[in-house]
Amino acid sequence: MIRDSWRIVRLGLKSLMLHKLRSTLTTAGILFGVASVIAMLAVGEGAKRDALERFQDMGVTNLIARSKKPAETQSSSSQSTWSALAYGLLYRDADLIAASLPGSEIARIREIKRPMMRGEYFHTSIVVATEPSFLEITNMAVREGRWLTDTDDRRLQNVCVLGETLARLLFPLENPMDQTVLVGGGDRFRVVGILKEQGRTAGAGSTPYDECMFVPMMTSRRRFGEEVTTRAGGSFSRERVELNEVKVKMPESNEVESGARILRDLIGTKLNDDVIVTVPLELLQQEEESKRMFNIVLAVIASISLLVGGIGIMNVMLATVTERTREIGIRRALGAKKKHIIQQFLVEAGVLSALGGIVGVIIGIILPTVITNVFEQRTDVMPQHVALAFGISAAVGVSFGIYPAWRAANMDPVEALRHE
């Protein structure tokens, strides 16, 4: 049985080698189809994982209430230039959130943009005033030193923790630990810790946490106050914001939905005005659904190439049947059964698709690496995608070879022998 199968395969290969160029062009359709399926799914998978990691970094059990500057109106623009625009979350709002969500952890956050200097090194970034609970809620970790404590907050200590990138910018040649940083031209903060590199964009507004300085909340209130004055082009504006953000960590993921509903109810009329609520779990679910649809679309588009390749195989096999009509008649006259003819042509179609599939898999695995290096787009080649692409290519080859094989098997042997 095995010997007969191997003989059929050898006969099929020999037949295909008689027309090398035609066989090569036929396999090209399958080749590019398989490669495109693997590459497109790798791009889609990479984009999906990037998005999922971004939302998971925000914390799938977290709720975020963030102050939003209201759009400028005629009444606000006509106010005195000396009056401060007040908006956003208040400390009492944070206390109300904590009381309404028992069992949850709360972190109050205040963000202030300030110039920072250490010797000749200078950088303008965000000072994040927060509380000890912030570290656990944001899933971050300290690389060296320690995090902020309740004692630092209670004693109004001028201590800070630096993000990894900010530490390198201000201390490129020395260890920042126990060194001082001049903030805003007048306040000196002692470095007590350095965060591990986060490698993510989530942070204070649009600034990654890796570039931020973290200080105790009460120290920030004493040193920087709650009003921010911005000067630009000979004009200036004043804003009063007590808290930029309140992060809430729910005990369990199944409590996120109810917690979000309570939080939105608490915000009430502010929801569409100067406070917005973000639920990373909802965003994660939406992103998963959109990426799932994106992958389906990519797979369908790439599968069209395989369909075209299958049509090419059918076309070539039909031409082969016509060319080998006399050969088929002789084999039938010598005792070959219909199943032997069908097996012969199905093997040839399968060999064509298998060769194209193997080369396509190799190219499909290499291509995502090229895309990553050239376009800096993350790609992830999944084993199941490779198996799927190759399996479809083999199925396409055999499926499109069935009709030519059936046509060859059902030829009249007498008419076939008369064929010139």
Image (spheres, rainbow, N blue to C red):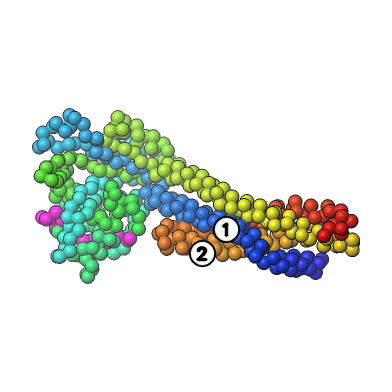
Residue 347 among magenta residues:
no
Q: Which residue corresponds to mark 1?
A: 32
Left or right placement of residue 160 versus residue 279 in this view: left
Q: Which residue corresponds to mark 2?
A: 366
Q: CA distance from mark 2 to mark 1?
A: 13 Å
Residue 84 x/y as whole percent: 14, 37
**Magenta region, residue range:** 183-197
Query: Mark 2, mark 1: which one is toward the viewer?
Result: 1
Q: Secondary structure at mark 1?
A: helix
Question: Label 2 is placed on what type of residue?
Answer: Ile
- Using the image as rendered, state which of residue 138 and residue 75 is in the foreground: 75
- Using the image as rendered, state which of residue 153 and residue 178 is in the foreground: 178
- Using the image as rendered, state which of residue 416 and residue 26 is in the foreground: 416
Left or right placement of residue 95 versus residue 415 in this view: left
Residue 389 x/y as whole percent: 60, 56
Assign the N terminus to one quadrant of the image.
bottom right
Please name the predominant secondary structure of the magenta segment in the image.
strand
Residue 184 among magenta residues:
yes
Residue 245 x/y as whole percent: 28, 43
Q: Residue at coordinates 35% horizontally, 55% vertically from top-left?
A: 200
